Amino acid sequence: MKKIAFLFSGRGSLIGSVVEGIGRSSVPAEIALVITNNKAFPAENGSLAGRFPVSRVLHSDFADRESFEAEISRQLDANDIDLIVLGGFRRIFSPAFVDKYGSRTINTHPSILPAFPGDGAQRRALEAGVKVTGATVHFINNEVDAGPIIDQGVVRIAPGMTEQALKEAIIKVEEVIIADAVTNILEDRIAVRDGIVRVVQ
């Protein structure tokens, strides 16, 4: 049984895509750990999607990033996690964390990377006047939103589209490509060579 951890900072809504990806895989898997650093998430008896207990790990409760990451690492190791999915987890990990977990950690970003990495990707896409943007799922590395790209999906920007409308359209794309990425990783279809991801059928 493969074990997956889901880390989030917002509402955690993308966990449904992870569940979908697991369901489509021929390899047995489960979400074994859910962690949030969202201060507003219930500290006790909180659950995500009504079924996943959530561990709340706030960076403000720790003296420094090293001790914050040490607690996350402790929970990952205690649960024998095989795959880590960052579903809008808004913290940048240290090189030490990336060295240990980067090859089994995937992140979603609301743009067609390498365009518009970092915060405010949707707003910056609108300000730049691009006609298409979208979402990317990638492995993490020591640069922000620069790891090997697993999959991407495109959103066409309609005339007069608001930032909120664009965010909602991109989330729909993220849901699809995260599910696909989880399935492909569980079934060992992903090969990375020289920083390039290939999906092996």
Image (cartoon, helix red, strand yellow):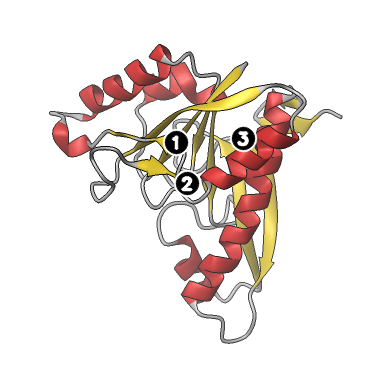
Q: Residue furthest left?
A: 63
Q: Nearer the viewer, mark 2 or mark 3?
A: 2
- The residue indicated by pointer 3 is 148
Q: CA distance from mark 2 to mark 3?
A: 30 Å
Residue 193 visible to an observer of this rendering: no
Q: Quadrant of residue 48?
A: top left
* Circles 2, 1 touching at the beta carbon (< 8 Å): yes
Residue density around tag 3, few if under 14, some if 14–19, many if 20 or more, within 10 Å: many
Q: State which tag comes first along the sequence, 1 or 3.
A: 1
**Of the numbered discs in the image, which one, if any, rests on residue 49?**
2
Q: Is residue 34 left or right of residue 24?
A: left
The C terminus lies in which quarter of the figure? top right
The amino acid pointed to by label 1 is Phe
Residue 3 placement: quadrant: top right
Q: Which amino acid, by three-letter code, is at mark 3?
A: Pro
For marks 2 and 3 on the same chain, the one whose residue lies earlier in the sequence: 2
Query: Which quadrant of the figure contains the N terminus?
Result: top right
Q: Position of residue 20 (x, y in %)?
A: 66, 42
Q: Residue at x 37, y 51 (%)?
A: 10
Q: Amino acid at mark 2?
A: Ala
Judging by the rendered image, the residue that carries numbered circle 1 is 52
Residue ID at (50%, 19%):
81
Count of numbered circles in the view: 3
**Separation of residues labelled 1 and 3 (CA atoms):** 29 Å
- Taking the spot 62% from the left edge, 51% from the top edge, the residue there is 175
Q: Nearer the viewer, residue 99 or 48?
A: 48
- The residue drawn where x is 44% and y is 42% is 144
Q: Is residue 159 above or below residue 168?
A: below
Label 3: which secondary element: loop
